[in-house]
Image: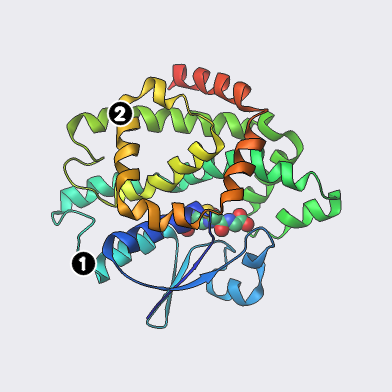
Amino acid sequence: MLTLYHGATAVCAAKVRVTLAEKGVGYESRPINLHTGEQFDPEYMKLNPNAVVPTIVHDGRVLIESTVINEYLDDVFPAPALRPADPYGRARVRLWTKREDAIHDAINTMTASILFRAELMQKPPEERRKRYEKIPDLAKRAKWAEIMDKGVESRFVDEALARFAKLFRDMEKALADGPWLTGDDFTLADIGLISFFYRLEMLECAGTWREHFPRVTDWFERCKARPSFKTAILDHVPPPAFESYRAHSAPVRPAVEARFREALKAA
Ligand SMILES: N[C@@H](CCC(=O)N[C@@H](CS)C(=O)NCC(=O)O)C(=O)O
């Protein structure tokens, strides 16, 4: 029995849903509403003390951290394999998945500064602070406080854009050797980045990757053509979310894109 605690648009949870979909593994769905703060429910935090999704419970055993969960799922549901059998091949996959926390942090910076901030600014300061004062990780809490104050002018946005620029360059290079990040086979390396790219697309930010990185652009189209993209990502995003993401990003998009071009020069 497999239970997945996840959020509809939560990109880390989507990583796990893609793996489950690729393997055809069903699960009991436990949605956690991140907007209303269900992640801070003490009962949920007994499972995931970081107050984040995803969490799985498999045969009574709890596991957190999307990258670790994906490796676990690949071990316990071996077909189809999402990592090569040989140690060197597995290490090459891990070189990509190791970066996912840093890239996720950058994705979170963009979403928080463009979308969450706009939503929270409509609330009184006291209520606004409550949203992030419960975050257990102090560095993440400080980042949220700065983003609420400065929005896309925050230094965290420049750091995020620099991470994307470096990632896109590295991906473009790697994709010269095959359709997927580690060569001929679709692996956890690819899975770990799909929902992040989709978030960037929804926010329409750093979208100039399409101008500069044709192989990355084609790679993302290949990812979207897989049935798992629809069942694990698209089907979970409520249509109003698209409108909301686009509407909030429109006013800041030109400035963000300009700074992304600067980041590309330095990457
Ligand atoms: N490193 C963690 C990150 C999990 C994470 O931050 N999840 C986000 C959604 S993508 C979340 O639950 N955020 C809730 C919050 O920040 O309050 C993982 O990969 O599982």
For residue 16, the mark is none
Q: Position of residue 127 (x, y in %)?
A: 82, 55
Residue at point 49% right, 37% down?
Answer: 201
Identify the amino acid type marked 1: Pro
Q: Is mark 2 within 8 Å of ligand 1?
A: no
**Picture layout, residue 45 above or below residue 205:** below
Identify the amino acid type marked 2: Glu
Q: Is residue 31 left or right of residue 223?
A: right
Residue 82 found in image quarter = bottom left
Q: Which residue is mark 2?
A: 172
Q: Quadrant of the N terminus?
A: bottom left
Depth check, front residue: 159 or 171: 171
Q: Position of residue 104 (x, y in %)?
A: 49, 46
Q: Which residue is mark 1?
A: 78
Residue at point 56% right, 37% down?
Answer: 203
User: How far apart are labels 1 and 2 at the CA level?
Assistant: 29 Å
Q: Is residue 228 left or right of residue 90?
A: right
Q: Is residue 255 left or right of residue 150?
A: left
Depth check, front residue: 241 or 98: 241
Mark 1 vs 2, N-terminal side: 1
Ligand 1 sits in quadrant: bottom right
